[in-house]
Image (tube, helix red, strand yellow):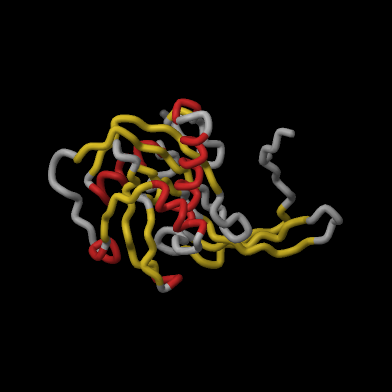
Amino acid sequence: MAIEDTAENWQIVATATPFTGHKTGVRTDDVVMPDGSVHQRDYQLHPGSVAVVALDDEGRVLVLRQYRHPVRHKLWEIPAGLLDVPGENPLHAAERELYEEAHVKAGQWHVLTDVYPSPGGSDEAVRIFLAQDLSEAEGERFEVSEEEADMELARVPLDDLVRGALAGELHNTCLVVGALALAAVLRGDGVDSLRPAGAPWPARPFEE
């Protein structure tokens, strides 16, 4: 049986944006339910994100450790960041994040998977890329600040990330999803079965 998510728009009879922050906001919609009743739904407005599973020739994944204040943890993550401009090509954003956070470039890119990390409370969409053929980027390193100034970098075998995710030791959504997805790909039909880096992304349309 084929299983696929489908787009759908239920009627909204009223909407408001009670909060707008630097990067995100909060929207309140009055939504008509299938039985005709109307219920209020609050959710985060988010520009969308990209993340990168950067796999080197030794089967290791580039990860970074960063403080995340809302959960009061230092989390191991993969390079990731916001889509800075509406309609931005997600591949360009992914290349930027890999450079800024790790000073690394990649010669080969694929779309690994697309996810909604928290669809019950946010419209955030994330495209996770697989990057291979890694090398050090040219030029000066990007100057990081705030939480990123305390960031640690490492290269960890993919199997260790999968074990840590399943053991409840690693919690970042993009890292967990990315590691499990890549492990499935490598044990299945292989990297060539993945979508190309420029594959359409209905959740965040972009121009080539």
- Give the residue displayed 79% in from the left and 56% down from the top: 33
Q: Nearer the viewer, residue 166 or 3?
A: 166
- As drawn, the residue found furthest toward the left would be 140
Q: In which quarter of the image is the C terminus?
A: top left
**Looking at the image, is 184 positioned above or below residue 13?**
above
Query: Residue 57: x, y in percent?
Result: 29, 36
Q: Is residue 67 shown left or right of residue 119?
A: left
- As drawn, the residue found furthest toward the bottom would be 72
- Give the residue displayed 36% in from the left and 67% down from the top: 74
Query: Residue 62: x, y in percent?
Result: 32, 48
Query: Residue 106: x, y in percent?
Result: 29, 35
| Number of on-image labels | 0
Q: Which of 190 and 24 is in front in this view?
A: 190
Q: Is residue 28 shown left or right of residue 110?
A: right
- Give the residue displayed 20% in from the left and 50% down from the top: 142
Q: In which quarter of the image is the N terminus?
A: top right
- As drawn, the residue found furthest toward the top would be 192
Query: Residue 133: x, y in percent?
Result: 29, 33
- Give the residue displayed 33% in from the left and 63% down from the top: 66
**Looking at the image, is 75 positioned above or below residue 187?**
below
Q: Is residue 132 shown left or right of residue 8?
A: left
**Looking at the image, is 141 positioned above or below residue 88?**
below
Q: Is residue 52 visible in this depiction of the protein?
A: yes
Q: In which quarter of the image is residue 90?
A: top left
Q: Is residue 174 visible in this depiction of the protein?
A: no
Q: In which quarter of the image is residue 4?
A: top right
